[in-house]
Image: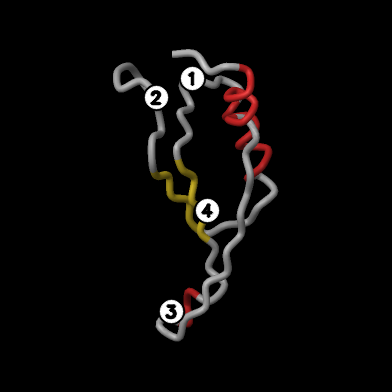
Amino acid sequence: FLLDKKGYKNALSLTLKKINLHSNNIPKPFSGFKILFISDLHIDIIPEMKDILLELINKENFDLCCIGGDYKFKNIGTF
């Protein structure tokens, strides 16, 4: 599996999107609670992805990090 130049460039163009949720159903202890959600990393096919990701998220203060979607592209081997 190889990405073409445009696909590779797009994959490395990580963005951080901030969403504020407001609800009366959120318990007060969670007021201001920040969750970082990372999705579809495919970290094993783009080696420099981890460095770009770390640079982006190290600037943020969050209380919880969740990873969803595809963490790896290959379904065999080590993490």
Numbered tag placed on residue 45 in the rendering: 1
Quadrant of residue 57 within the rendered picture: top right
Label 2 residue SS: loop
- Marks 1 and 3, Cα distance to the nearest angstrom? 38 Å
Query: Would you call the spot at circle 3 few (<14 residues within 10 Å), some (14-19), or many (20 or more)?
Result: few
Nearest to N terminus: mark 2 or mark 1: 1
- Marks 4 and 3, Cα distance to the nearest angstrom? 17 Å
Q: Can you identify the residue that label 2 sits on?
A: 73
Q: Residue at x 63, y 56 (%)?
A: 61
Nearest to N terminus: mark 4 or mark 1: 4
Nearest to N terminus: mark 4 or mark 3: 3
Q: How is the image coloured?
A: secondary structure
Query: Would you call the spot at circle 2 few (<14 residues within 10 Å), some (14-19), or many (20 or more)?
Result: some
Callout 1 amino acid: Ile
Numbered tag placed on residue 26 in the rendering: 3
Q: Can you identify the residue that label 4 sits on?
A: 36
Work out which residue is located at the far top of the displayed protein and give it.
2
Q: Position of 25 compared to 3: left or right?
A: left
Query: Would you call the spot at circle 4 few (<14 residues within 10 Å), some (14-19), or many (20 or more)?
Result: some
Callout 3 amino acid: Ile
